[in-house]
Amino acid sequence: MPLLDNKLNEVQQELQSLAKEALKDNESRKKLLGIAMQSVATLESPVETIWRMMLSPAQLAALMTIVKAGLLASLTTDKEPKSAQQLSAETGVEELLIVRLMRPLTALGIFDELQPQTYSSTPISEMLMTPPLLGGFQYMYLCSARSFANLPYYLEKTGYKNVAGTPGPFQDAHQTDLGLFPWLVSNPPMMTYFNNFMHEQRENRKDWYDLFPMEDILLKGANTSDTDAVLLIDVGGGEGHDVEAFHRRFPHHPGKVLLQDLPPTIDNIKPGQLDPGVICMKHNFFDIQPVQGARAYYFRSVFHDWPDSDCIKIMKQTAAAMKRNHSKLLIFDFVLPDMNTPLYPALLDLNMMALLNAMERTRGQWIELLKSAGLKVIKFWTIADDVEGLIEAELM
């Protein structure tokens, strides 16, 4: 079909040209990527789709082996092409095994095969070698994958009940009574992978105050007459990335800004690590909130780590400290649509179930959850279904 072939060549050239332009703007890039993915879904046959899904564990297993055997580091450190024979001499991995492991990874574009059995790194493998993503890959493979592999059998044992508390899939898969976070503390290498992964997540996500009108949500109505008034508390805020960035973005904001987290986290913050304008406080959000009447109590990516029963406990402790007609509860988390949820938050929801017996939530679920703690939603601030939104709530 010469005419069709010519059209396909024209489409290919146009797509290549569009891709170069789209890479200059992230929103355009995401839109073009969505179009391409829809085209793949249309063109891929049902059998091809099923086989791709069935064989996906083999891709991850091959890549994890490459990581553990030192082959990834060897190819990305000096970025020079190396033959399977050279890699075998460097790492001790048998030459034939290297060739077999590399076949799917070169097909996926993770490595290039420049000539038979000679390989080089690509932007994908080089990015994977960075500590945050390498830590994230190892954490997800060694921790999450086991929980996911066991999930169907766990749910079968429970009569296919929704996961809503401990013990859950994680405890069943890892044969432990511990929750994820205590389990990580007891496994230092895994904790290192996790912390590296979370650091990357915090560093590369958009700041909530640049997405939504902070003047209307937070600054307007703040107490400007009392020098001891608290404007914002980042509750469970880790090592303070969000609250420090807020303080620097609005250096003349009224009131104080606080960071609260568990003692080990606060103790881990080195002198001079945070702007001196950020006040650090040791606090467990399941306990009574010691700071009364702050303008805003802010939680980022906290509630999706907990089942409803625990979320209500946290929210009630916060609500008890809030001042009517002044204090706000600000939650930066996913707000799932009622239908056609994008793939990333949909998979993240299952990840929360498999690891933390928790969940991502829809608008309706957020409304009911907050209502159970004596709170009401003022507004859902959202920009897209595939990114986090801000939930603004007050006392009922």
Image (cartoon, rainbow, N blue to C red):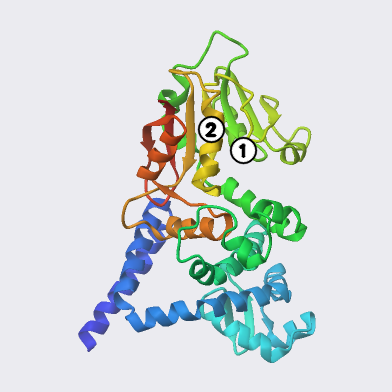
Q: Nearer the viewer, residue 285 or 10?
A: 285
Question: What's the residue at 47%, 26% (across, down)?
Answer: 328
Q: Which residue is mark 2?
A: 298
Is 31 on the left-hand or right-hand side of 224?
A: left
Q: Nearer the viewer, residue 145 or 286?
A: 286
Q: Earlier in the sequence, mark 2 or mark 1?
A: 1
Query: What amino acid does circle 1 point to?
Result: Gly
Q: Secondary structure at mark 1?
A: loop
In the rendered view, tell whether residue 247 sits above or below residue 49: above
Residue 323 percent across, percent down from the top left: 50, 18
Residue 178 percent across, percent down from the top left: 68, 55
Q: Nearer the viewer, residue 241 or 352?
A: 352
Q: Secondary structure at mark 2?
A: strand
Which quarter of the figure is the N terminus placed in?
bottom left
Residue 280 percent across, percent down from the top left: 70, 29
Query: What amino acid does circle 2 point to?
Result: Tyr
Contact (CB < 8 A) between labels 2 and 1? Answer: yes
Q: Residues within 10 Å of mark 1 (few under 14, many from 20)?
A: many
Which quarter of the figure is the C terminus placed in?
top left
In the rendered view, tell whether residue 358 sits above or below residue 73: above
Q: CA gap, disc 2 to disc 1?
A: 9 Å
Question: What's the residue at 49%, 22% (across, down)?
Answer: 327
Labelled disc at residue 237:
1
Residue at the farthest top position: 225
Asked whether residue 80 appears in the rendered view, the answer is no
Q: Residues within 10 Å of mark 2 (few under 14, many from 20)?
A: many
Tell me where residue 170 sits by quadrant: bottom right
Residue 30 percent across, percent down from the top left: 39, 57
Tell me where residue 313 sits by quadrant: top right
Question: What's the residue at 33%, 80% (across, down)?
Answer: 46
Question: What's the residue at 78%, 80% (across, down)?
Answer: 90
Q: Nearer the viewer, residue 372 or 6?
A: 372
